[in-house]
Amino acid sequence: MPFVWLDAEGIARAIPTSYVVVMELTYPINFVGFENGDVSGEVITRDGEFLGNWTFEKDEAEDTGAFHFTVDGESEPLFTEGFAFLDSRLKTGLALSTICRSIREWLEENDQA
């Protein structure tokens, strides 16, 4: 049975219960599924607000990758953060941190408007 909540517009959202059990939403911005090696998933705040979806795109020939964040209801990414050296966990972590900071700043700007 999925974990279900209502988003800011009153629309029911759900994520698999396994994410709730395995992953606490400890960060201000959480890329659900990333810790399991998924290449896409949902972006949820620490408070459980569903913001949209993330995807990870890699180009093994160029040894590069990019995270994309698409706002719920949109078709194009709002933020993209690319990086080189796919085998570098430091570079991956830095790219993830940067895109999460961009999402957090965007969210704070929209909350104040």
Image (cartoon, rainbow, N blue to C red):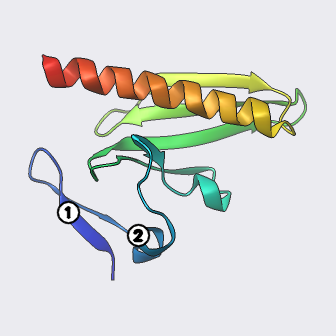
Q: Is residue 45 above or below residue 65?
A: below
- Count of marks, rendered view: 2
- Separation of disc 1 and disc 2 at Cα? 12 Å
In the rendered structure, which amino acid carries the disc numbered 1?
Answer: Trp
Which residue extends farthest left? Answer: 10
Q: What is the quadrant of residue 110 in the picture?
A: top left
Q: Quadrant of the C terminus?
A: top left
Q: Which residue is mark 2?
A: 20
Q: Position of residue 43 (x, y in %)?
A: 41, 45
Q: Residue at x 56, y 50 (%)?
A: 40
For mark 1, give the secondary structure: strand
In this rendering, is residue 4 above or below 82?
below
Residue occupying image coordinates x 26% and y 48%: 49
Instruction: Give the residue type at disc 2.
Output: Val
* Nearest to the observer: residue 47 or residue 36: 47
- The image shows residue 7 at horizontal and vertical percentages of 17, 50
Q: Position of residue 54 (x, y in %)?
A: 50, 41
Q: Residues within 10 Å of mark 1 (few under 14, many from 20)?
A: some
Q: Which residue is mark 1?
A: 5
Residue furthest right in the image: 61
Local SS, label 2:
helix
In this view, 107 is above or below 13: above
What residue is drawn where x is 29% and y is 27%?
A: 107
> Which residue corresponds to the image point at 37% horizontal and 28% vertical from the top-left?
104
Q: Earlier in the sequence, mark 1 or mark 2?
A: 1
